Image: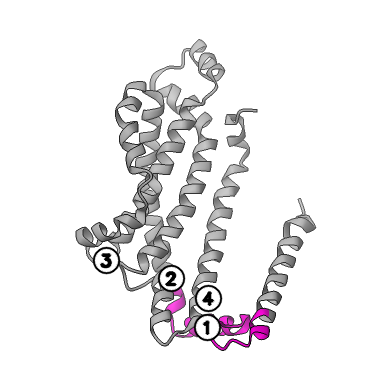
Amino acid sequence: MKPRFGDVGLPLLVAVTAIALWYLAVRWSGTDIFPTPSQVLAGIVELAQRGLLLKYVVASLFRVSSGFLLALAVGVPAGLLLGWFGLAYQAFNPVIQLLRPISPIAWIPLAILWFGVSDLAPIFLIFLASVFPITTATTAAVQNIQTVHLRAARNFGVTGLELFKKVVFPAALPQIITGVRLALGVAWLVVVAAEMIAVNSGLGYLIIDARNAGKRYDLVVAGMLLIGFIGLILDLGVRRLQGLEELRWGFNR
């Protein structure tokens, strides 16, 4: 199926308009501090030529993927158990709801104390930022499963672990994917903040280093745009999962 104009043309039109307004605003203000789009593009080219662009992007993606995959490995099974077993939910949910509102940024001093200035500190922060939304979303997904699915499965003799594999997890998966999408966005925000303080590489470090080393605001804005662009790609990847035909049956209609 061919993409419609609205799928590509409208976003492209908005992007071009925003760039044009950006250029005009800089020229109209007469500032020599805030960069124009062409200066930012030149900054990105400079980073690529110095070998820093790929290095910093890979460093940030490595930390996000490590912490996020660890959160998935913990959060999804924990949410399935909490959603299915009422006693476990009563015991652990208050603790989760106590820790969940604490900003991952507030953990930065402790992360540096425990792990030092290394990759482990931002990975730990990303894990914290992701695991609670994933666990909460998975728990709610299991609790919201339509009882007709469970009754139908039990009528056919499906119980125990087989019920989890064939009914509970597939039915909860659409809502889990939604929670994963939200958690991934938070994780990408947190890695940038953590890299500004806890490590000496990555896109967050690029922004703070460019600010401190000669006030290179072209590189600051370049880092911001790279963060937004990569975040958009990650979000689009998760959204593609939501469109899979195999996941749609689990939604309430």
Mark closest to the chain's N terminus, 4 or 2: 2
Quarter assignment of residue 4: bottom right
Q: In the rendered image of this protein, does residue 207 appear above or below residue 90?
A: below
Q: In the rendered image of this protein, does residue 56 appear above or below residue 127?
A: below
The residue under label 4 is: 221
The residue under label 1 is: 43
Q: Are marks 3 and 1 in contact (CB under 8 Å)?
A: no
Q: CA distance from mark 3 to mark 1?
A: 27 Å
The stretch of residues the image draws in magenta is 25-54
Residue flagged by tag 4: what amino acid is it?
Val
Residue at disc 3, secondary structure: loop
The residue under label 3 is: 118
Quadrant for the C terminus in the image: top right
Asked whether 28 falls inside the magenta stretch, the response is yes
Q: Position of residue 13 (x, y in %)?
A: 75, 67
Tell me the crowding category of disc 4: few under 14, some 14 to 19, or many 20 or more residues within 10 angstroms, Cα based: many
